[in-house]
Amino acid sequence: MTEALKKWIAPKDFYKKVFLISVPLALQQLLNSAMGIADSMMVSWIGQVTAVGTAAQIENLMMTVGFGVASGAGIFMSQFFGKQDLKSEKKAFGLGVILSLINALVWMAASVFFGRQLMRFYIPDPTVIESALQYLMIAMISYLPGALITMFSFAYRCIQKTHVPMLIGLVSMAVNIVLNYCLIFGHFGFPQMGVQGAALATLIAQTTGLMIHIVYAYKSKQSFIGTPREMFALNPDFVQPILRRAYPLVLNELFFGFGNTLYIRAFGRLGTEAMDAYYVGNQISNMFFFIVQGLNSANGAILGASLGQGDLELAKRQGNWFVALAVVLSAVSSLLILGFAHPMVDLFGLQNANVVQEAVLIVRIFSIRISLRMFNVLVFSALRAGGDSKFLAFLDAGIMWIVGLPLAFILVEGLHFTSIALVFLIIQVEQLVRMVIGLKRYFKGAWLIDLTQEVKTA
């Protein structure tokens, strides 16, 4: 084996560690996607795919910003864990909880006061809007437990115990699917509530998951959990360095999330049939993102711990090993998507042949997207682990607004493309641009920083 090749091949214990961290998280992502598919299948049977998908855009925004909040706190939690500074780890978790609650409350307020306007922003169909509002007014309550579950999941990633959120997620998924079946269709003596039943099932499942998280964390005495004083007695010298690194991540997720909803607005101009195809194709494709998310989380946890220990050279070698791993996994995931596209679309029982054809094409295009996204997510993880958050914001949300969104609206409104699959294919240029710029930044090594030196823990 040549020296040039050796730097990309890791020792066996590295792959074992990646496996132990990433597989539970990948399975959790797979479970979440399966739950989303189950939801979509059931609401498709009552003709409400677009209504629920449109209402879910607000939750997607909330969760996207919540991801930024949890990531900001998680940067420091990972490095404090590597340094074995458990006192500071608890405080970083407490700050993440506070910010997560604020985020959820903001989106709940937006749903209450501007729900109709937000739904009209995405789709003009008044019938769809009414159904979407019925779903939203119940589902918005689940934002609170959902945001906190995200923070707990990040905490377990940071301490490399990823099997815990996976198991709790499995319980939540089971609760959600069973209650969906009962409340949407009125089985086993439950009322037939339609889209409202789907929303109520989500609320109950999320609340159940949060209660299990809280009880388990305290009973098992996890390193990030403590008394209210240990977690929430925060001083400015501790908070300010974390917020300085976190706010670009939060702004990035906000603009990225809003950008994603603008894609929905652009696609919505193509009509309800196009949106049905997109929502079904997107739900299926999300199942295959489990590989990306698992690798992403392992990357952030391992690199963060190495950086917190001050071993920058080890972190650099580990980053290169992850890049090589991404090459293999992206090829595998793309082949799986191509092979199973049509059978999985058939599960939704769509009646319109054009919708089925477009949905299958979208799923296959996702095979390209996931291959490119694999590299981009690894770059994001490295930049996030080292606190290079401003450049990450440019790379993620900035490229979307500079390249992807203008291209989508030009294709739909300027050039009057009618095929959502063709539009979706062309806008993958965004991922390619992001990959080229991101890899240049990664190899420059600007992310190799020990952030624990910035925080005063006294």
Image (tube, grey):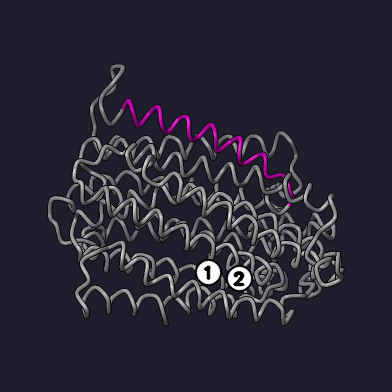
> Are the residues tagged 2 and 1 within 8 Å (C-beta)?
yes
Residue at the image point whose x is 31% and y is 66% from the top? 422
The answer to if 165 sits in the magenta stretch is: yes
State which quarter of the image contains the C terminus.
Answer: bottom right
Q: Is residue 226 left or right of residue 26?
A: right
Q: Secondary structure at mark 2?
A: helix
In the rendered view, would you say 176 is above or below 245?
Answer: above
Residue occupied by mark 1 = 250
Residue 199: image location, x then y, percent: 33, 40
Residue type for callout 2 = Ala
Cα separation between marks 2 and 1: 6 Å
Q: Decide: few, some or many residues near mark 1? Use Cα within 10 Å; few <14, some 14-19, many ≥20.
A: many
Residue occupied by mark 2 = 246
State which quarter of the image contains the N terminus.
Answer: bottom right
- 69 or 435: nearer the viewer: 435
Residue type for callout 1 = Val
Residue 386: image location, x then y, percent: 72, 72
Residue sitting at the far top: 188
Q: Quadrant of the rendered structure where residue 456 is?
A: bottom right
Q: Which mark is residue 131?
A: none
Magenta range: 159-182
In the rendered view, would you say 432 is above or below 165?
Answer: below
Q: Secondary structure at mark 1?
A: helix
Q: Is residue 202 left or right of residue 49?
A: right
